[in-house]
Image: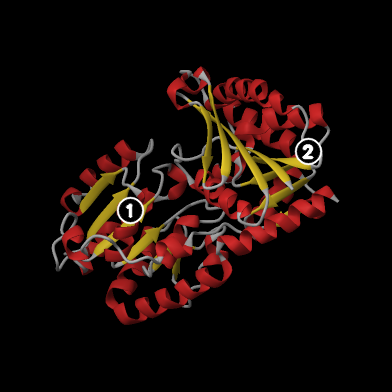
């Protein structure tokens, strides 16, 4: 079986959950005898070329459009033109299929599908209307949604990561349910389960004193991730747990606002904006934190919750989207009302005050991830999906 995957991101260029998903799915497919080729754009000419990455043949295509000072839609159109030109060397993918992840590489995917006459499948990780919580109100958003609509219409079948996303795509794009298949995200459980190479106490000391409980969040700092709700909850948390320290890892356009919000609330000394952290440090923070908090306003799946669960960290998540399906309240974690600082404060304090129960929930969560969200299982589900499409 041959699969050509078009992805906006691939290691070492990974910023969000979509890129991580593609990077971990592809090697898992290779281990089950799928011929996987990935085409992905890069912004520097010296990064271009073909490499074997965990058994996956990765074609990194240089395109100057990645540095265009314009909106993401116009940038994506230019990047796709470069990907189309490069992909023509494959001539035809007879007996195989094209797999696109979200709209960012949809233009090239649709063109190649029409040129070669082979099936096009798509994984929809999120939608523009969903991120805007149902409201589209500017030209850029309309353009992105139109690209999503065209991609869904041109695809033979669609993968979504949760029942929430199935309902979203079905509702927003009037997509028949027969065209939609749920295949969840996953995590490399075996890698996460390996013992840490650093001394945890020494590492923890970089962020907090021994008697300061760490409240941890690691996300891209954009509005829909709800970090402003967590910052707003901190005064309530500190009133009951004055030694608590919030560590926020990640970067994004919300960073200046969040820092200003912390300053306005007078809690700057209790909030550590760690910025970008390596995967190793991200995982070590999960190991030393008292709880990990993800107060998203919109969350198609929530792969970061799986990572926290795999590392045995108690989690507090908002009861939205995929989080509602992955985290069961008082069974594998604590769920809170979305966009509600008081509820987030309650969830965090509940975890801090009931340490044994929180750890018990974390142990259950870890078993759940190991059983349901391992990449071997997800790759097998994906291969069965591919076979159905090819048949």
State the residue in front, 326 or 173.
326
Decide: few, some or many residues near mark 1? Use Cα within 10 Å; few <14, some 14-19, many ≥20.
few
Tag count = 2
Q: Residue furthest right?
A: 391
Q: Which residue lies at the image location 47% right of the left edge and 44% below the top edge? A: 16
Q: Where does the image place residue 175, in percent across and percent down from the top left?
A: 78, 47
Left or right of residue 138: residue 343: left
Q: Where does the image place residue 188, in percent across and percent down from the top left?
A: 48, 59
* Quadrant in which residue 239 is drawn: bottom left
Left or right of residue 281: residue 44: right
Circle 1/circle 2 CB separation < 8 Å: no
Decide: few, some or many residues near mark 2? Use Cα within 10 Å; few <14, some 14-19, many ≥20.
some
Q: Which residue is mark 2?
A: 153
155 vs 320: above or below = above
Real-space CA distance between mark 1 and mark 2, rounded to the nearest whole angstrom: 40 Å
Q: Which residue lies at the image location 74% right of the left edge and 29% below the top edge? A: 112
Q: Where does the image place residue 201, in percent across and percent down from the top left?
A: 18, 65
State the residue in front, 375 or 325.
375
Q: Where does the image place residue 262, in percent across and percent down from the top left?
A: 24, 47
Residue 212 appears anywhere in the view: yes
SS label for mark 2: helix
Left or right of residue 240: residue 317: right
Left or right of residue 270: residue 367: right
Residue 280, disc: 1
* Quadrant in which residue 222 is drawn: top left
State the residue in front, 319 or 160.
160
Mark with earlier residue (1, 2): 2
Image coloring type? secondary structure
Residue 354 appears anywhere in the view: no
73 vs 387: above or below = above
């Amino acid at each position: 079986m041959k699969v050509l995957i078009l992805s906006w991101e691939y290691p070492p260029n990974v910023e969000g959950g979509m890129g991580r998903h593609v990077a971990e799915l592809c090697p898992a497919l290779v281990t089950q005898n799928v011929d996987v080729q990935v085409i992905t754009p890069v912004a520097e000419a010296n990064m271009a070329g073909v490499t074997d990455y965990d058994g996956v043949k990765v074609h990194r295509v240089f395109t100057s459009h990645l540095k265009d000072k314009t909106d993401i839609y116009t940038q994506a159109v230019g990047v796709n033109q470069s990907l189309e030109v490069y992909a023509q060397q494959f001539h035809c993918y007879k007996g195989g299929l094209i797999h696109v992840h979200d709209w960012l590489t949809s233009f090239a995917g649709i063109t190649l599908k029409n040129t070669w006459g082979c099936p096009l499948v798509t994984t929809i990780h999120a939608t523009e209307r969903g991120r805007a919580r149902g409201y589209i109100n500017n030209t850029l958003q309309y353009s992105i949604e139109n690209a999503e609509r065209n991609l869904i219409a041109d695809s033979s079948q669609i993968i979504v990561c949760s029942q929430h996303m199935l309902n979203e795509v079905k509702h927003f794009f009037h997509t028949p349910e027969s065209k939609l298949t749920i295949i969840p995200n996953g995590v490399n459980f075996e890698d996460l389960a390996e013992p840490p190479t650093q001394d945890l106490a020494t590492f923890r000391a970089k962020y907090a004193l021994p008697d300061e409980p760490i409240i941890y969040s690691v996300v891209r700092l954009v509005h829909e991730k709800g970090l402003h709700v967590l910052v707003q909850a901190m005064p309530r948390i500190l009133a009951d747990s004055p030694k608590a320290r919030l560590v926020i890892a990640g970067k994004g356009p919300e960073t200046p606002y969040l820092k200003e919000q912390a300053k306005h609330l007078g809690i700057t000394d209790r909030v550590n904006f760690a910025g970008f952290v390596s995967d190793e440090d991200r995982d070590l923070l999960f190991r030393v934190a008292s709880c990990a908090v993800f107060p998203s306003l919109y969350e198609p799946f929530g792969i970061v919750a799986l990572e926290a669960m795999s590392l045995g960290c108690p989690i507090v998540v908002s009861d939205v989207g995929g989080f509602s399906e992955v985290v069961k309240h008082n069974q594998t974690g604590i769920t809170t009302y979305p966009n509600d600082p008081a509820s987030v404060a309650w969830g965090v304090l509940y975890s801090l005050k009931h340490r044994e129960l929180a750890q018990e929930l974390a142990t259950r969560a870890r078993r759940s991830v190991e059983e349901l969200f391992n990449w071997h299982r997800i790759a097998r589900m994906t291969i069965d999906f591919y076979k159905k499409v090819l048949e």
